[in-house]
């Protein structure tokens, strides 16, 4: 059970960090389309994009990350290594 919980938490964190990275990329490359009209490309737009993406969609990224991480933890419980096998 602990593997599922740890997998879910790690998956949620990775999902939100990935979402923030996608927002930074969107703000750095296409800020006028994806972040805010009239904003010039650069680090300010990347930071704003990361913040906005994470602020609006953190729940979706965390939910998907938790589902994937929980499934990985479940598989880790089901598929155990053989006794004496070096892992």
Image (cartoon, rainbow, N blue to C red):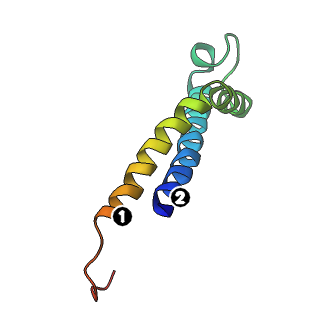
Residue found 69% across the figure and 20% down from its top: 40
Q: Is residue 17 above or below residue 43?
A: below
Residue at the outermost top position: 37
Give residue 1's mark: none
Residue 34 in the image, given as x and y percentages of width and height: 58, 18
* In the foreground, 42 or 85: 85
* In the foreground, 29 or 69: 69
Q: Quadrant of residue 32?
A: top right
**Which numbered disc, 2 or 1, marks the residue closer to the eye?**
1
Q: Quadrant of residue 12?
A: top right
67 on left or right of 62: left
Residue 13 in the image, given as x and y percentages of width and height: 59, 47
Secondary element under disc 2, as helix, strand or loop, is helix
First along the sequence among labels 2 and 1: 2
Give residue 77's mark: 1
Secondary element under disc 1, as helix, strand or loop, is helix
Residue found 56% across the figure and 33% down from its top: 25
Residue found 65% across the figure and 33% down from its top: 50
What crowding class fits label 2: few (fewer than 14 Cα within 10 Å), some (14-19), or many (20 or more)? some
The quadrant of the picture occupied by the C terminus is bottom left
55 on left or right of 73: right
Q: Is residue 67 above or below residue 23?
A: below
Q: Is residue 85 above or below residue 61?
A: below
* In the foreground, 5 or 9: 5
Residue at the outermost right position: 44
Query: For mark 2, what is the residue?
Result: 6
* In the foreground, 81 or 24: 81
Residue 51 in the image, given as x and y percentages of width and height: 70, 31
The number of numbered badges drawn on the structure is 2
What crowding class fits label 1: few (fewer than 14 Cα within 10 Å), some (14-19), or many (20 or more)? some
């Amino acid at each position: 059970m602990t593997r599922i919980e740890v997998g879910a938490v790690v998956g949620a964190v990775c999902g939100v960090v990935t979402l923030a990275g996608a927002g930074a990329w969107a703000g750095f490359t296409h800020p006028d389309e994806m972040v805010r009209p009239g904003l010039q490309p650069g680090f300010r737009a990347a930071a704003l994009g990361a913040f906005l993406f994470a602020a609006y969609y953190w729940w979706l990224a965390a939910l998907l990350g938790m589902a994937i991480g929980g499934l990985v933890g479940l598989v880790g419980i089901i598929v155990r290594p053989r006794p004496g096998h070096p892992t």
